[in-house]
Image (cartoon, rainbow, N blue to C red):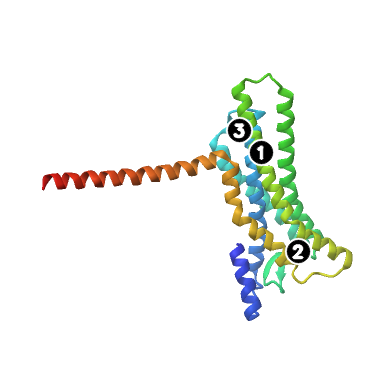
């Protein structure tokens, strides 16, 4: 989606092409839904840690099937909420200076509604989960066994890292929100408002997967195991090849 947006901006700047169409409006709403789902994945990870620590006796909430179905349920709910709120406000429209469709920053009710649904809502959910887990661990004291306490400390650390990543993504949106508030005060729109808003988002996506890889031990172990498996496979093939060459040489 970001590559498509950047290509349209470049073509519009160089050749003055217009991409105003119903497909463009659809892509604008789709971008908001995908951005909202990006933050909801962090909520799901924090929710899983909450279940493992606080409600560990409930096995159904730890099942793999739940976390396979959950994103599909969330994307339907998020789509309905965004469309219900933004369509009456004409939240997404074509930006002629930027040559793509997105939530109009000068449409204050629309952009604030989108920010609350996509950014602020998930961030508050993760913050609430982290506070609840922290309070629960402190209330337990020395009641839990050493193994459980170690697992809880590890899950709390992962939740803290997730919160830090989401906080960083939230902070990257501050330049755009600053320009929006400047527009509210002065009444003048900055000509590069959309470009400034999208640049930190594009930059953050480049390092987001790497940050998640180092923040969640399970993902890191999966990648390390894949690398180990490939290395072992290559070594085995090399050894088989050497043995076969020795057999052929011995036969000759």
| Residue 17 seen in this snapshot | no
Q: Is residue 26 above or below residue 55?
A: below
User: Where in the figure is residue 202, as x and y percent of width and height?
Assistant: 64, 60
User: In the image, is 215 to the left or to the right of 180?
Assistant: left
Identify residue for label 3: 61
Mark 3–mark 2 Cα distance, whole angstroms, equals: 38 Å
Tell me the element at label 1: helix
Question: Pointers 3 and 2 in contact (CB under 8 A)?
Answer: no
Residue positioned 39% across, 46% down in the render: 230
Identify residue for label 2: 90
Question: Pointers 3 and 1 in contact (CB under 8 A)?
Answer: no
Most foreground residue, 29 or 37:
37
Most foreground residue, 48 or 147:
147
Q: Earlier in the sequence, mark 3 or mark 2?
A: 3
Q: Residues within 10 Å of mark 1 (few under 14, many from 20)?
A: many
User: Where in the figure is residue 146, as x and y percent of width and height?
Assistant: 61, 22
Q: Earlier in the sequence, mark 1 or mark 2?
A: 2
Identify residue for label 1: 159
């Amino acid at each position: 989606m970001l590559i498509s947006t950047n290509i349209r901006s470049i073509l519009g700047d160089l050749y003055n092409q217009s991409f105003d169409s119903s497909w463009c409006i659809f892509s604008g709403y789709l971008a908001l839904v995908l951005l909202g789902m990006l933050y909801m994945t962090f909520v799901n990870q924090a929710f899983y840690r909450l279940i493992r620590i606080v409600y560990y006796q409930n096995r159904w909430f730890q099942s793999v099937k739940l976390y396979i179905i959950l994103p599909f349920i969330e994307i339907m709910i998020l789509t309905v909420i965004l469309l219900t709120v933004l369509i009456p406000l004409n939240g997404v429209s074509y930006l002629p200076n930027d040559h793509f469709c997105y939530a109009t920053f000068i449409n204050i009710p629309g952009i604030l509604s989108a920010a609350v649904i996509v950014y602020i809502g998930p961030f508050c959910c993760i913050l609430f989960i982290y506070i609840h887990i922290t309070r629960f661990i402190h209330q337990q004291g020395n009641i839990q066994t050493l193994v459980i306490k170690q697992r809880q400390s590890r899950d709390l650390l992962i939740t803290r890292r997730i919160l830090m990543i989401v906080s960083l993504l939230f902070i990257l949106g501050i330049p755009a929100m600053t320009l929006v508030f400047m527009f509210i005060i002065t009444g003048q729109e900055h000509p590069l408002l959309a470009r400034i808003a999208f640049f930190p988002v594009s930059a953050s996506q480049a390092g987001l997967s790497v940050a998640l890889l180092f923040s969640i031990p399970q993902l890191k172990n999966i990648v390390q195991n894949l690398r180990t498996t490939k290395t072992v496979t290559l070594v085995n093939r090399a050894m088989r090849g050497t043995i076969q060459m020795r057999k052929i040489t011995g036969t000759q």
